[in-house]
Amino acid sequence: MLPVANNEFAPLADALTRAGATLFYYPGVRTEPLPAAEIQESLNASVPAAPDADNPSAPHKPASTTPWLLLTSHAAVHALTPYLSDLRTQLPIATVGRAAAFALSGSDIESDTDTDLRQNGSILRLQTIHTDLTIQDTNPDAAATTVTESIPTSAPLIMPVAAQAHEPLLGELRRRGYTVTPVPVYRRFMGRGGDPVAAYLFQGGVDAIFFPSPEHLRFFRRRLMQEGGVLSMLDHVRVYCWDNWTATVAREYGLSVTGVLGTLTPEHMQHMLQARA
């Protein structure tokens, strides 16, 4: 089971299907990009103008004060899809967490050069964007430590975020001396639709569930409880998480984590499909 919409993490879903899985979808969280005009206005106010190629004498900022774009979620990458190629020419890019890196590169299962990203019912073609820094751990303290090891505190950070959402990493980076500008680019809502997962869990019809991020887990739990279910329904389900921070949150909720998938290889896909012990 994937607690996502059926158009999210399409390469992962395709790989699981090829490995023999029957997938159930149950989106706990639904994200929606803000209107394009709002995103553009926020980017214009936050991102410095590109260097004037026609004026070689124009002053350039030293590297230590060049702003960085910090992408921390799958949803942020989707919301910024129309702007990423231009942003890449203006800013170095860092990703935090496998979900953001996965969305930005298309897939770490296959080496496709581009990927389809569905946004507001439209399919957008995103060529693979290469990053300057990839941070795998989404634990705010660990992620902030990696940032401080790689980016000077004199470099402003631009962080696309969900509107009206608390971002622990943002606060941790500010505590360490960074100037961080949050740029709202999407909204979060309670998920809806998908398969009747509560019934499948009650019947013992789910063998494994994969949580891509703490947000997917938190919203999954909230929706399941609103629909009359409880997390203990996962007691006999193999629980996989994409990274250690998601696994930590899962354990805090009382779940027994079967494994953390560091990379999504065919072998991992096969392991996820093994019969329950």
Image (spheres, rainbow, N blue to C red):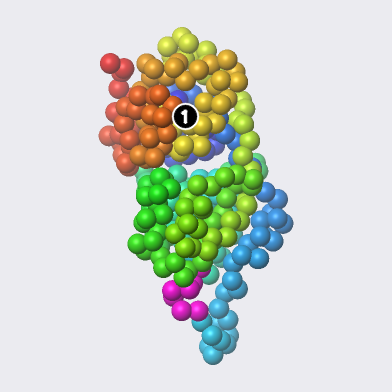
Would you say 133 lies left or right of 160 here?
left
Do we see residue 112 in this rendering?
no
Do we see residue 152 in this rendering?
yes
Residue 66 inside the magenta-drawn segment: yes
Q: Can you say whether 134 is above or below 9 in the image? A: below
- According to the image, label 1 marks what residue? 2
Q: Nearer the viewer, residue 197 or 158?
A: 158
Residue 260 inside the magenta-drawn segment: no
Residue at 51 percent across and 52 percent down: it is: 171
Q: Residues within 10 Å of mark 1 (few under 14, many from 20)?
A: many
- Name the image quarter holding residue 94: bottom left
Image location of residue 185, percent across then percent down? 62, 51
- Name the image quarter holding residue 29: top right
Residue at 45 percent across and 38 percent down: it is: 213
Image location of residue 69, percent across then percent down? 51, 61
Q: Which residues are magenta?
A: 61-67
Image location of residue 143, percent across then percent down? 40, 51
